[in-house]
Image: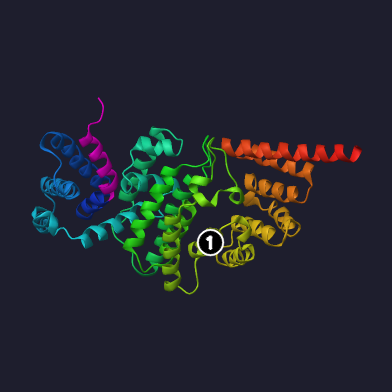
């Protein structure tokens, strides 16, 4: 049966509001898994009633109230101890009130609690990402599985285990305070950034980018930025996401093949996202004098965004930001990116030794971008046979088909250039 306009409305609404609804219910029952079930009960009620009775004037509030009443019914049936009865009385009154009495502040507080719960460091990273997409983004298990090229049973088991861990570990449904909030916030930001990166540069599959994942990460980042406007790194993260997303449409050509940053059509970069990113960056810098990893990366992204042509890119400034970033966040990936920036700012002969040194780094063993960067530097130095071999090595290491094809093409180009130069010398 084809979906009706009402069904499409419900689907879109659920995608937008499910996180808030689950968060509002979880605030009552203190169990994320149960809250999801009760919220789905409200969704089922909407699917049953709205096609015949019409969509209510405030559909989001209708779903919220229905779900909260399901929660109250559940609490009542369970006949919890006296403390729960007191909560029941309080919450019943609250839920039974007009929907306008459910304050935005209460909903936002619940939503923030849900974000911190689904991104709890007690969960493995892949579970945090899957649970966040399920509960906060409203994606189905099948949609998450397709996004990560996995199977529905695998994702379903991952989500079930995550909810069981939250229950078994008795992880409180709350926003941590003090130093713990700072530590837990890092986990939240990591999940959102991982989600975005998987969409921006897919690690597996036939497509280089998955825009839907980027959009979900941006949506979650914007929500978090609204809920925590005084956190500089939150502003830094959303700035970084907006600025990088501004280039998303130009990262591939019509055939889905990768387009290098320096070859992208900058006229097609999304100026609205650039403006939003620069504004968020300014807010973050105003909050914190010593920038963290997300503000620094946003600064680098801003350097690219401000350059109207590739030639205007301030690579020396970018290299300087990477120097600071490497101090703040010593990572071989950052070191590799710094080498790229140094190569652009001071020449490939300066950067090549840095990359060759990084090839000895165990954490980068088998990481295709190391060989890819070395190939690029060697190509610029006109050492074409070595560059060709490096590209071929990188092609054998990547798990993304589009990227593999591009690397093989670059290897072939280097070989052709070497052959052409040899022929020229002979003639």
Residue shown at the point (71%, 39%) measured from the top left: 411
Instruction: Name the image quarter holding the C terminus.
Output: top right
Q: Looking at this rendering, what residue extends furthest in the top direction?
A: 1
> From where the camera sits, is residue 399 visible?
no
Q: Is residue 243 visible?
A: yes
Residue 336, compared with residue 418, is above or below; it is below
38 w.r.t. 312: above or below: above
Quarter of the image where one finds residue 93 = bottom left
Q: Which residue is mark 1?
A: 306
Per the rendered image, the range of residues in magenta is 1-19
| SS assignment at label 1 | helix
Q: Quadrant of the N terminus?
A: top left
Q: Position of residue 114 (x, y in %)?
A: 30, 54
Along the line of sight, the residue nearer the viewer: 288 or 156: 288
Q: Position of residue 102 (x, y in %)?
A: 16, 58
Which residue extends farthest right?
426
Please give left or right for residue 363 compared with residue 37 in the image.
right
Please give the name of the residue rendered at 24% of the width and 52% of the height, measured from the top-left corner. Answer: 26
Disc 1 packing (10 Å; few <14; some 14–19; many ≥20)? few
Of 185 and 235, the residue lying toward us = 235
């Amino acid at each position: 049966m084809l979906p009706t306009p009402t069904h499409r409305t419900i689907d879109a609404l659920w995608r937008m509001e499910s996180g808030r609804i689950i968060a509002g219910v979880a605030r009552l029952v203190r169990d994320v898994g149960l809250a999801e079930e009760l919220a789905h009960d409200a969704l089922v009620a909407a699917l049953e009633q709205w096609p015949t009775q019409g969509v209510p004037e405030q559909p989001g509030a209708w779903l919220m109230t229905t779900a909260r009443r399901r929660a109250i019914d559940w609490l009542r049936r369970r006949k919890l101890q006296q403390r729960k009865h007191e909560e029941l009385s309080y919450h019943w009154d609250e839920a039974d009130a007009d929907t306008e009495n459910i304050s935005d502040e209460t909903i936002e507080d619940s939503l923030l609690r849900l974000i911190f719960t689904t991104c709890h460091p007690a969960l493995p990273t892949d579970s945090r990402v899957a649970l966040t997409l399920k509960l906060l983004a409203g994606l189905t298990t099948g949609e998450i599985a397709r996004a990560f090229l996995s199977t529905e049973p695998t994702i379903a088991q991952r989500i079930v285990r995550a909810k069981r861990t939250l229950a078994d570990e008795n992880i409180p449904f709350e926003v941590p305070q003090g130093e713990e909030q700072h530590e837990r916030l890092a986990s939240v930001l990591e999940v959102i950034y991982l989600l975005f990166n998987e969409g921006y540069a897919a690690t597996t599959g036939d497509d280089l980018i998955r825009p839907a994942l980027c959009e979900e990460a941006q949506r979650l980042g914007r929500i978090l930025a609204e809920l925590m406007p005084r956190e500089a790194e939150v502003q830094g993260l959303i700035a970084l996401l907006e600025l990088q997303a501004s280039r998303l449409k130009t990262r591939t050509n019509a055939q889905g093949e990768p387009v290098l940053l320096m070859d992208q059509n900058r006229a097609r970069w999304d100026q609205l996202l650039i403006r939003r990113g620069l504004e968020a960056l300014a807010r973050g810098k105003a909050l914190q004098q010593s920038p963290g990893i997300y503000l620094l990366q946003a600064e680098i992204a801003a350097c690219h965004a401000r350059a109207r042509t590739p030639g205007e890119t301030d690579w020396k400034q970018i290299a300087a930001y990477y120097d600071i970033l490497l101090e703040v966040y010593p990572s071989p990936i950052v070191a590799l990116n710094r080498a790229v920036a140094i190569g652009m700012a001071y020449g490939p002969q300066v950067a090549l030794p840095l990359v060759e040194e990084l090839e000895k780094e165990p954490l980068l063993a088998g990481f295709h971008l190391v060989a890819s960067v070395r190939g690029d530097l060697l190509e610029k130095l006109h050492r074409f046979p070595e560059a060709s071999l490096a590209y071929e090595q990188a092609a054998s290491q990547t798990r993304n088909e589009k990227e593999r094809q591009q690397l093989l093409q670059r290897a072939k180009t280097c070989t052709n250039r070497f052959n052409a130069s040899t022929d020229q010398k002979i003639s």
